Amino acid sequence: MKLKKVQKKLAAVIGASCLALTLFVCPAASLPVQAATNQDYGISPISDIKTWIYAMNGDSIYKRLFNNSTGNWIGDWIFVRKIPEKAPDPNGHHHN
């Protein structure tokens, strides 16, 4: 009776050892891998990607929001500011 318990434990240990060795001898990195695409799992961005686009018109700067994800403009052009006639020199020099 006791011999059967020892044999079962020994079989379990040998089986676990073989399984562990198999994992080390055949690592998963050597298996072929196929990258998932958006269509495989229905992956989509959480939100659209948007960019402010700036433009000069005469002596004024305007901006407008562009949705890069859909390729559409959002809203109208917004006035930002006037461009100064003569920008001050950042070094404090006076120009004649």
Image (cartoon, grey):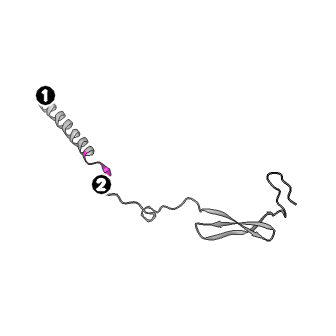
Q: Residue 13 falls in which quadrant of the image? A: top left
Residue 52, image x, y percentages: 68, 63
SS at badge 1: helix
Return the residue at label 2.
31
Above or below, comparing residue 13 to residue 81 in the picture: above
Which residue: 41% across, 60% down? 36
Q: Residue 22 falls in which quadrant of the image? A: top left
Residue 12, image x, y percentages: 20, 37
Mark seen at residue 33:
none
Question: Can residue 35 be found in the magenta stretch?
Answer: no
**Three-letter code for the amino acid on which mark 2 is drawn:** Leu
Q: Residues within 10 Å of mark 2 (few under 14, many from 20)?
A: few
Q: Earlier in the sequence, mark 1 or mark 2?
A: 1
Task: Tell whether 94 sits left or right of 73.
Answer: right
Q: Quadrant of the N terminus?
A: top left
Q: Residues within 10 Å of mark 1 (few under 14, many from 20)?
A: few
6, 53: nearer the viewer: 53
Which residue: 43% across, 63% down? 37
Disc 1 to disc 2: CB gap under 8 Å: no
Return the residue at label 1.
2
Q: Which residues are magenta?
A: 25-29
Task: Say whether residue 44 is visible.
Answer: yes
- Single out the mark in the foreground, 1 or 2: 2
Task: Tell whether 6 sits left or right of 61.
Answer: left
